[in-house]
Image: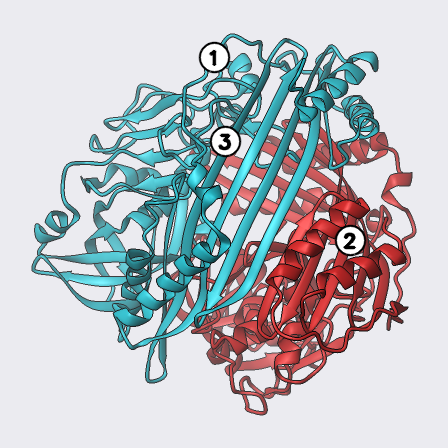
Chain colours: A red, B cyan
């Protein structure tokens, strides 16, 4: 895309009038998207988006410019723009551009560009038929979408680091709409990973479709969820929306430093029950939020955030780390070359415990079992969060009872995590696109089956406002 | 020709190549944007961002099938490559007799979309606006503790659209705005507030008022307590009401109707809302931030009344959904960027202002809840219309706003909600492309403690 000689020239030009740090992020992203609705392949779209973002940091200030023009002239002009905004002396610019070693490697088995569009379209149609077959007459609509992205990046900076990387992500989503009389319900299932077409080896499209159709049809006969405070059991397969919202965003260092996190100033303190260990690990194989290097060229690693209830670390990018005279722990991510990196999650999860998940349900006298979570959001300043329950059941005397619909769970992050009473031995991941400051990045999250003493169903205990982090399920 | 536009040349090459590759019809869309954003915190520039983006997309039709591709490579070779991919993508899509491109002929509205003052103002002046906004918030109340971001932003766009049926159009537009998010604190408690001021003109931007507004929103919530479960009348601030309009919006598109996911399907001519409610989409609105002379397919934009005095009038259409319905496109073939094909979407979508001052609306009430914040709006189900959201705001007692409350939830169905609106303010406010005045809704259940 861009050779090292030019990268050096650009970094040199960017720091011409000062700055503590400069970097360039060059990206070429090829995407394919197929959409099917009403049994027809309606859209097949593909494209290439290439560009570069150049950044200069001086003190607390960041100057950022991006362009699609990857010619020598285009990049020099962008560098000149940011150099004007840089202030103060130049410190320690090193333009050696030496390769950085990753801590993990990922292999892509079936590259999307080697799979024909027809084959991808067939897969989509297979899912459409499977959903209709599984749900019968009650299925009124099926929406299937397939997407893949091959993202090639080059990252070079004034610390002398140079990284070339490639990320291939594939995702697949089925939404089924079922109706009976005046009742309409939707069911939804998505899979995705840092991988190519091999995604479907372990996730047959039929299975994804059947799950979505089953959920839509079952929800037709569900009764409205009760409202009020009650014990809640989160099933392992429910996904990790809660951990993402209840503490993930609040542990991003930029929010902490700006005084916008309820976890600010609490490092070393107990912020959760001792059953709770929270980890973000972008090095996990075959997860949607995985990466070899973050978008600042820092190798991904496992970061323990909360250890047995104690807050031990935050997620840092280079800028937030430098403010605390530390080094980044590999969480500087960006949506594309059009965005500056900020601290973001990768694969966030609550570590599994030792208890048999079935035992957790058996020991619950009454409450709500959350079998699948939907989207959610959080106000990190207060820690108040809310998320939907896509599939929930009432528990009575340790038995799983009737299906309920329309449940929304609300709570306060530190408060809810402090009343986690049992943690199961299982772990189930869900994928999503996490939004923050207008940037969407792929993430996954998970938690084991957990018993929570009580949460508010259908309401908000301390209604949170102005969310600054949210997740949409794909 | 003396002044050949290089972007138009590329668009023409893309059309020509598409035709050479066998397309029955082809369309090329090129956008070229520049954006500036400045974030200020504590009187200093935290981020200054300058952006330039250009891209081309090609949409083709062949024997009733359609394909789409895009690229940021605007060379002649790049244009050819995009045309090739679009044709290739065409092969896997289903035949649909309504796939077509619009013909020229519509009269484009005359709009002033480019205020040269935006370009003329220096970066230093724009930084000063963001600083002034931050200062005005801090000066409003000492309890304003944290400025999350005080932002100035502007952008300009040049759109070129050419199709093989003869549409050959271009327009230039610009916008600017300021945005402030902050937190106020007292003791352990912290409350957030924000405000924004976006428009097509530079001079009217008002940092002092925007700063005070954000501060006022945060400070008034300090000391918020719980509320008891009650059935009560509620008043929605324009920002909150606009959020609810966002749930209804998708159901007002021809696409949602044709796909069986509109809760308004089959209700044209029927009453769907209180007679006080009129909902309009107007792509040719003077000063509208989403205004443009033509949509993403080259069709003239215009004013579409969707709901008049509570009665559903019709739906928004692009060329495809209009053909399928046997009507004319309403000029709502909207493209987010060159990377997306024109889908049915909104331009400036709003609830028409009523004639009551919002204070009058509150004054008439013995008790109620004035809702200033809603949480979880994105979890509302646009197909069924069911919503369950967290709410916060101020209690209304004897015609006045009293203490702040949080920790309440409100659920319901949007259709029922629309019918129970009994007051519409004269204070229509836009938040981006959507807007609403203050609304009062009777008999809602608020669940609290």
Q: Residue at x 80, y 17 (%)?
A: B17
Q: Where is residue A457 in the image (x, y as percent from the top left)?
A: 42, 64
Q: Residue A46 carries which label?
A: none
Vertical order, A426 against B435 (above or below): below
For marks 3 and 1, the one nearer the N-term is 1
Is residue B378 shown left or right of residue A176?
left
| Label 1 element class | loop
Give the chain of mark 2. Answer: A
Q: Do the residues labelled 2 and 1 touch (CB within 8 Å)?
A: no
Q: How many labels does the image show?
A: 3
The disc placed on residue B345 is 3
Crowding at label 3, few (<14), some or many (≥20) Cα neighbours within 10 Å?
many
| Chain of residue at mark 3 | B
Residue at x-position 78% and y-position 63%: A12
User: Which mark is on residue B328?
Assistant: 1
The answer to whether residue A345 shows anywhere in this view is no
In the picture provided, is A127 more to the left or to the right than A224?
A: right
Kindly identify which numbered label has been placed on residue A26.
Answer: 2
- Do dots 3 and 1 share one subunit? yes
* A197 sits to left or right of B446: right
- Subunit under mark 1: B
Dot 2: within a 10 Å radius of its alpha carbon, few (fewer than 14), some, or many (20 or more) residues?
A: many
SS class of the residue under badge 2? strand
The correct choice, above or below, for A418 with respect to A430 in the image is below
| Image quadrant in which the N terminus of chain B is located | top right
């Amino acid at each position: 895309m861009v050779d090292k000689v030019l990268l050096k020239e650009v970094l040199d030009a960017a720091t011409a009038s000062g700055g503590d740090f400069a970097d360039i992020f060059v990206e070429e992203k090829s995407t394919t998207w197929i959409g099917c609705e009403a049994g027809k392949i309606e859209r097949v779209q593909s494209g290439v988006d290439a560009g570069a973002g150049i950044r200069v940091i001086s003190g607390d200030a960041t100057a950022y410019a991006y362009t699609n023009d990857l010619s020598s002239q285009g990049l020099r002009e962008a560098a000149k723009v940011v150099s004007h905004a840089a202030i103060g002396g130049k410190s320690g610019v090193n333009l050696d551009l030496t390769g950085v070693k990753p801590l993990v490697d990922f292999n892509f088995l079936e590259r999307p560009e080697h799979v024909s569009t027809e084959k991808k379209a067939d897969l989509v149609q297979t899912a459409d038929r499977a959903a209709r077959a599984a749900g019968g007459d009650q299925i009124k609509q099926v929406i299937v979408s397939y997407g893949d992205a091959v993202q090639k990046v080059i990252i070079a900076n004034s610390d002398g680091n140079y990284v070339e990387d490639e990320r291939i992500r594939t995702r697949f989503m089925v939404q089924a709409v079922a109706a009976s009389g005046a009742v309409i319900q939707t069911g939804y299932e998505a899979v995705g990973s840092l991988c190519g077409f091999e995604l479907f080896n372990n996730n047959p499209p039929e299975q994804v479709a059947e799950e979505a159709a089953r959920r839509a049809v079952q929800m037709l006969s569900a009764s409205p969820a009760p409202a009020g405070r009650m014990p809640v059991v989160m099933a392992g397969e429910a996904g990790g929306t809660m951990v993402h919202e209840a503490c993930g965003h609040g542990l991003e260092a930029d929010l902490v430093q700006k005084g916008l996190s309820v976890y600010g100033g609490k490092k070393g303190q107990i912020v959760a029950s001792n059953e709770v260990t929270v980890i973000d690990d972008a090095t996990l194989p075959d997860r949607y939020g995985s990466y070899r290097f973050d978008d600042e060229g820092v190798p991904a690693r496992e970061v323990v955030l909360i250890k047995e209830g104690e807050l031990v670390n935050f997620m840092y990018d280079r800028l937030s780390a430098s403010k605390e005279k530390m080094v980044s722990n590999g969480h500087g991510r960006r949506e594309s070359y059009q965005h500056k990196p900020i601290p973001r999650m990768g694969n966030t999860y609550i570590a599994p415990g030792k208890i048999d998940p079935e035992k957790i349900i058996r020991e619950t006298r009454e409450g709500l079992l959350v079998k699948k979570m939907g989207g959610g959001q959080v106000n990190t300043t207060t820690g108040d969060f809310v998320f939907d329950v896509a599939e929930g059941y009432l528990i009575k005397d340790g038995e799983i009872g009737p299906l309920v619909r329309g449940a929304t769970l609300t709570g306060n992050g530190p408060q809810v995590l402090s009343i986690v009473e049992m943690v199961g031995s299982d772990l189930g991941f869900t994928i999503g696109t996490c939004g923050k400051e207008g940037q969407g990045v792929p993430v996954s999250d998970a938690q084991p089956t957990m018993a929570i003493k009580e949460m508010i169903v259908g309401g908000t205990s301390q209604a949170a406002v102005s969310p600054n982090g949210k997740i949409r399920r794909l | 020709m003396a002044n050949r536009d290089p972007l138009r040349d590329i668009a023409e090459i893309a059309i020509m190549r598409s035709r050479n590759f066998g397309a029955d019809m082809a369309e090329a869309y090129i956008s070229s944007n520049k954006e500036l954003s400045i974030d200020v915190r504590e009187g200093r520039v935290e981020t200054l961002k300058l952006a330039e983006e250009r891209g081309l997309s090609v949409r083709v039709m062949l024997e009733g099938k359609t394909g789409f591709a895009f690229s940021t490579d605007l060379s002649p070779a790049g244009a050819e490559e995009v045309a090739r991919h679009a044709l290739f993508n065409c092969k896997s899509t289903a035949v649909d007799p309504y796939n077509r491109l619009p013909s020229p002929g519509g009269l484009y509205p005359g709009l002033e979309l480019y205020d040269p003052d935006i370009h003329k103002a220096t970066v230093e002046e724009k930084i000063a606006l963001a600083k002034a906004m931050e200062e005005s918030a801090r000066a409003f109340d000492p309890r304003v503790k944290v400025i999350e971001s005080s932002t100035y932003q502007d952008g300009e766009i040049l759109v070129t659209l050419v199709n093989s049926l003869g549409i050959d159009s271009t327009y230039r537009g610009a916008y600017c705005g300021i945005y402030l998010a902050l937190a106020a604190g007292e003791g352990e408690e912290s409350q957030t507030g924000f405000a924004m001021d976006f428009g097509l003109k530079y001079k009217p931007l008002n940092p002092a008022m925007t700063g005070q507004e954000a501060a006022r929103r945060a400070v008034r919530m300090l000391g918020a307590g719980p509320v008891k479960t009650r059935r009560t009348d509620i008043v929605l601030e324009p920002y909150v009401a606009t959020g609810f309009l966002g749930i209804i919006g998708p159901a007002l598109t021809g696409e949602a109707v044709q796909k069986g996911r509109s809760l308004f399907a089959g209700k044209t001519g029927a009453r769907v809302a209180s007679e006080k409610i009129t909902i309009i989409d107007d792509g040719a609105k003077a000063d509208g931030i989403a205004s443009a002379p033509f949509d993403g397919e080259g069709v003239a934009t215009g004013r579409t009344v969707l709901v008049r005095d509570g009665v559903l009038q019709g739906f928004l259409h692009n060329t495809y959904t209009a053909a399928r319905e046997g009507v004319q496109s309403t000029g709502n073939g909207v493209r987010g960027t060159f990377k997306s094909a024109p889908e049915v979407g909104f331009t400036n979508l709003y609830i028409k202002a009523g004639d009551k001052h919002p204070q009058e609306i509150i004054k008439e009430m013995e008790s109620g809840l004035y809702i200033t914040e809603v949480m979880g709006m994105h979890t509302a189900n646009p197909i069924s219309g069911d919503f369950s959201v967290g709410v916060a705001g101020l209690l209304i007692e004897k015609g006045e706003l009293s203490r702040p409350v949080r920790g309440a939830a409100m659920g319901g169905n949007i259709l029922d909600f629309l019918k129970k609106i009994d007051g519409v303010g004269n204070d229509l406010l836009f938040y981006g492309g959507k807007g609403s005045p203050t609304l009062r809704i009777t008999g809602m259940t608020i669940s609290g403690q």
